[in-house]
Amino acid sequence: MTAPIPSTSLPVSSSRTRSGHRVKLARAWANSLDGTAFIPLENAAFRLRLEHVVDRLVDAVLAERLAEDRVRSTGRDLVAWGCTGAQSLQVTMEVLGRGLLELPGAAKRAERIVLVLGSLAAGYTEALRISTMEQQESMSQALLKALHESRRQARAVEAEFEDVVENSVNGIVLTDRDGTFLRANDVLGEILGHTRDEMDGLSLFDLVRPAEERQLRDAYATLVTGAAHRVQCELRLLRKDGDSAWATVTVTAPGGAGPTGRFVVVVEDRTELNLLHGQLNHQALHDMLTRLPNRQYFTTSLERVVRHASPSTGITLYHLDLDAFSLITHGLGRRVGDLLLDSVAHRLEGLFEGEDAMVARFGADEFAVLVENSPTTPDAATTVRRINEELSEPVYVGGHAVASPASIGVVDRPPAGMDAASLLEAAEMTLARAKRNGRAQWALFDPFQDDRDREVFGLAVSLPGAWENGQLSVEHRPLVRLADGEVVGLDAVLSWEHPYRGLLPHERCAELAEETGLILPLGGWLLGSACRDAERRRADLADSPPPHVGLTPNQASDPDLLGRVLGVLDDTGLPADRLWLGIPAAALAQDGGEAAENLRLLAGAGVATEILDFGTCPADLAHLEDLPVRAVRIARRLVRRQARHAGEDSLVTAALREVLAVVRRTGTTVIVDGVDTPEQAEWWRCVGADVAQGAFTAG
């Protein structure tokens, strides 16, 4: 409860002793007033004040002369204390009227009592009037202040809105429900190519294409009915010059526009963004150098064409790889290579002009062509011939006359059921098969050959896992001296116990490892195993057969070959002169000379060296003069050919006799692989072979 309101006309206490009647009257008055208004006084304090008022009123009744002003002030005090309820004056008159008449001798003073109560009511009424006027004045002042503040805020908001509209990067226009412009900013004029004056009276519906007008009218209707407060749509607005401006149009009904309201339209110009988006899309789907479709775009188009291709004519897919491109870029520079690629792109497009075809660049020096065949489309062989005739023709780029024919994989009229991904894979594998046949070759997709290639590739990629899982092991094949049958060496070879294909021989393992690049670590493991086994045998028998390990072309050309070999010898303790390493003749013939240099370094370190796949050509014989070789191993193809023509005096047989005679004159040991029968062994011994390996040793 609030603090008591002090009286301005009553003393805090009365000097006379109140009668019980007066106190009772004051208590009854207080109880009656308490139900008529909220009085911000504690009950005891309020009753005490009313007791003073009763004293004052009784004194006025009993006095010889009525102090009217004093009684009026009592009425004003009641108003000041908050006794201003609708029934407050009425209950006051009723309680005091009865109570004062019950005073001793009051009957003789009834008229005075009426005058006292009238003066009290007059003071109360006057004070209540003044209080009401003051409250009304205060309220009026508050309302006026609020109105001024509201108007000030409205002007501030309007100024802020004006600032937003005029400085916005978007076009903003106020329209009526029919889309008619009521007010627009300059940015909208820039978007539409109109001045402010020209935009007066324009309708938003007149600035959209007929196909989009319905969409915009539906948006306005949604706002008019109150179904939404804001709608947004993508539109093409008509500019003054006739062009289109791509825009995101947002229409808002502030506070619910209703059927007669106004709409705020914000126009975000997306023309440049859409153009940039289109350019980015084009760049994402096209090669930047040649401007041809890229692999992604080509694949998407291929998916569509496969679904709708004519069953009678079908489609043909060509996958090209430029054969001499790396030579051109390395010899003449990347710029000349880029110019050549651009030239190839234009020439391929020219070759297929008139056909329903797509030419694409897949990356680097690879291109692809998809042809939807017609009855007049040339066959695949003719098309391939025309492609290479065109690409083989020298063109001048960067001041140089260059040409680059292509290897081509062709998938012609593929069987139904092949999807786009399968077609691309088939073309790629067919191209790889064509490249294995040499430069400027082409191959036609063969499902059976494709399955065989996939099988080989599957084996190649599973080789690392097989090694990790212990499916690979090292075996030793005896090398037998033909003169007396003594074992003079052991070939260390790989063996793969495949869970589904059975035992795979060393030659297949080495070929797969060479294809995948696994040959260096796997070959190192084979070399280490062979040397450790040899050192264990040497510990038991000092004159045990030495290990022979054949290297692949990649191993033979490894710049770190000597370091690897010496590291293995150091780890195993095997002396260098107890190790034989074979290097393929083809690797020795390579232009770089890495394999030949490695052979010299190995021989210098004390390692015994031999030439693998030794043939009858002069180049192989030249190695015997140029390199420190201790043995040659005759190529298996020659061994197999001799076996097929045993007893015949063929050219190969005659050549072998002559070659072995030459080799023998150099003091080089001749080793023969794949000798399966004693008759073969005897033939090779007679023509000068020293050592043989093969099934004949089983007997």
Image: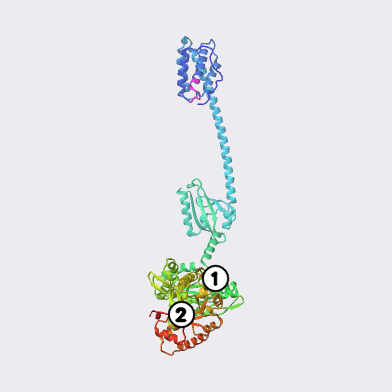
What residue type is disc 2 on?
Answer: Ala
Q: Identify the image quadrant of the C terminus.
A: bottom left
What residue type is disc 1 on?
Answer: Gly
Seen in the image, is 172 located left or right of residue 87?
Answer: right
Residues packed near mark 1 inside 10 Å, few (<14), some (14 to 19) or many (20 plus): few
Q: Position of residue 72 (x, y in %)?
A: 54, 18
**Residue with the mark numbered 1:** 563
Query: Which residues lie in the magenta part?
Result: 38-45
Residue found at the very far right of the displayed protein: 399
State yes or no: residue 42 in magenta. yes
Pick the front one: 577 or 185: 577
Report the Cα–Cα distance between label 2 and label 1.
51 Å
Q: Secondary structure at mark 2?
A: helix
Q: Earlier in the sequence, mark 2 or mark 1?
A: 2
**Is residue 404 depicted above or below 284 in this figure?**
below
Q: Find residue 144 and report its image quarter.
A: top right
Residues packed near mark 2 inside 10 Å, few (<14), some (14 to 19) or many (20 plus): few
Q: Position of residue 141 (x, y in %)?
A: 57, 32
Magenta stretch, main secondary structure, is loop
